[in-house]
Amino acid sequence: MGLLLLLLLLSVFTASSGEDAFIGVNIGTDLSDMPSPTQVVALLKAQNIRHIRLFDADRAMLLALANSGIRVTVSVPNDQLLGIGQSNATAANWVTRNVLAHVPATNITGIAVGSEVLTTLSNAAPILVSAMKFIQSALVAANIDSQIKVSTPHASSIILDSFPPSQAFFNRTWDPVMVPLLKFLQSTGSYLMLNVYPYYDYMQSNNVIPLDYALFRPLPPNKEAVDSNTLLHYTNVFDAIVDAAYFAMSYLNFTNIPIVVTETGWPSKGDSSEPDATVDNANTYNSNLIKHVLNNTGTPKHPGIAVSTYIYELYNEDLRPGSVSEKNWGLFYASGVPIYILHLTGSGTVLANDTTNKTYCVARDAADPKMLQAALDWACGPGKVDCSPLLQGQPCYEPDNVIKTHLMLLIHIITRWLWLMGPVTSMELLPSLPQTQVMVRVGFREVVVEEMAPL
Ligand SMILES: *[C@@H]1O[C@H](CO)[C@@H](O)[C@H](O)[C@H]1NC(C)=O
Ligand SMILES: *[C@@H]1O[C@H](CO)[C@@H](O)[C@H](O)[C@H]1NC(C)=O
Ligand SMILES: *[C@@H]1O[C@H](CO)[C@@H](O)[C@H](O)[C@H]1NC(C)=O
Ligand SMILES: *[C@@H]1O[C@H](CO)[C@@H](O)[C@H](O)[C@H]1NC(C)=O
Ligand SMILES: *[C@@H]1O[C@H](CO)[C@@H](O)[C@H](O)[C@H]1NC(C)=O
Ligand SMILES: *[C@@H]1O[C@H](CO)[C@@H](O)[C@H](O)[C@H]1NC(C)=O
Ligand SMILES: *[C@@H]1O[C@H](CO)[C@@H](O)[C@H](O)[C@H]1NC(C)=O
């Protein structure tokens, strides 16, 4: 009997423990100079960002992501939730238009149904699980439910008494939603989506939470938080919140649902009432977060269990309403220039490099393949151009798309010419331009480069 119980406990979580955690990035679009989808994808590739979450299912963005290998979580925006939760047919249409139209070329791996619905749109709470079930049944009907997981991101504020984590529980008001929701996640092999904002917990704690504890900085052992029930030691707020969510689920008897952190981050700028929204703190938080997640450290309750995490967010969003910090959660300016260079030496390749002065490998399938081949032959031969960036393992290598690769070579050549003028942030071969011209964006200026020698 004792042995049986032990085996049962050990088998919990084996399903997810073999996987490595990943770092993804959220892409908000409230920018006055939002880069084009091709430019966004170029930045993602240059930064080796392989997982993203969109706050909608924008068609142009999903088309630009095709064949990029990037894994995409799309979202049902809150303003479409009521319709989908009330009608199976509306849900099926949504899936047809926003998912089936793009897979498999675009690797959609998750659907976030609404955003923080319980805390921001409580009138939709009663239909939230129906919406998820309707979306799921459309995926089942299309036989793509094994690749695409359906869930819904929660604000961590639905967890009450979150310290010590072992005493945490979900706000009981929402038990009639949370119980069927967790049953759904369990039966479909999905995961709990959780938004984790140590910045706000720190801000609201009136100095009870030390800044170092929020920023994953080392604490002296006597400052570490200890859960007196479990004797687990907590060295950072992030882990404590994720464990509080595990405990809140187990309080409702759900013990095998993994967690994916759909949003976390730190603002790099704030107004006078937000003195800890600084470039240094944002860099420290995100750098330490990335190292922590990619190390597969897990949490004190579930060491070694992957907690994949999406950073909020790719770009600063200058059009977002609210305080100064609201507009400054991004890792990059719209130009693609990083706001700060993360300290990530030795921790993998995601977001590991400054791309300020680098070539973006962007191209459109616009030109005649024969002309491109001729251009390539000329450039790498008599043209004496360094073709090494196109070799396997190099930044512009794309095994699946020879034509695109050729276009990238041309772009690379031009980039080298233009480096003298300033940081080249993107380039496109536009179908509307003659094939001998390339549109280039240098910093904020647009330049048309004409009369490429071989053509
Ligand atoms: C899509 O993403 C899934 C999950 O990461 C992966 O297993 C699969 O190989 C990807 N498919 C393609 C075509 O890249
Ligand atoms: C909802 O639609 C799906 C197809 O999208 C279908 O398989 C399922 O049976 C429908 N469910 C209900 C309750 O009508
Ligand atoms: C629990 O949720 C309800 C409904 O949103 C809210 O009114 C209440 O304040 C929450 N309880 C706590 C302790 O936050
Ligand atoms: C969880 O399971 C225990 C033991 O089977 C049971 O006593 C308890 O009522 C369950 N709790 C919930 C919320 O279902
Ligand atoms: C990475 O994990 C190892 C073992 O799990 C641990 O000893 C080490 O401190 C971790 N490093 C970081 C940066 O978290
Ligand atoms: C980042 O830059 C360093 C130093 O230039 C280099 O060694 C490393 O390979 C680069 N990583 C990526 C992912 O390009
Ligand atoms: C980019 O290139 C310019 C001009 O060569 C140089 O002044 C600048 O320091 C470079 N920026 C970075 C981040 O390397």
Image (spheres, rainbow, N blue to C red):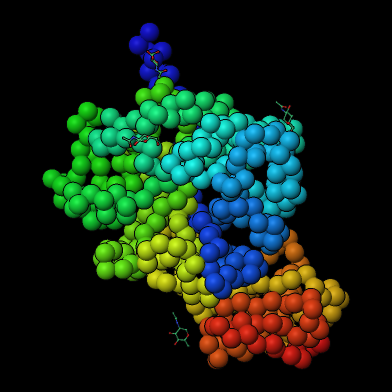
Residue nearest the viewer, comparing 122 with 204: 122
Residue under the image location 85 percent in, 75 percent down: 368
Residue found at the far left of this picture: 222
Q: Quadrant of the N terminus?
A: top left
Instruction: Judge whether 108 appears above or below 312 on screen.
Output: above
Residue nearest the viewer, comparing 81 with 33: 81
Residue under the image location 51 percent in, 56 percent down: 26
Figure quadrant of residue 255: top left
* Visible residue check, residue 113: yes
* Visible residue check, residue 191: no
Figure quadrant of residue 251: top left
Taking the image as shown, residue 377 lies to the left or right of residue 285, namely right
Instruction: Judge whether 24 appears above or below 261 on screen.
Output: below
Residue under the image location 38 percent in, 37 percent down: 158
The spot of residue 44 in percent (x, y) is 56, 64
Residue nearest the viewer, comparing 437 with 22: 437
The spot of residue 336 in percent (x, y) is 52, 73
Instruction: Judge whether 447 appears above or below 222 on screen.
Output: below
Residue found at the far front of this picture: 123
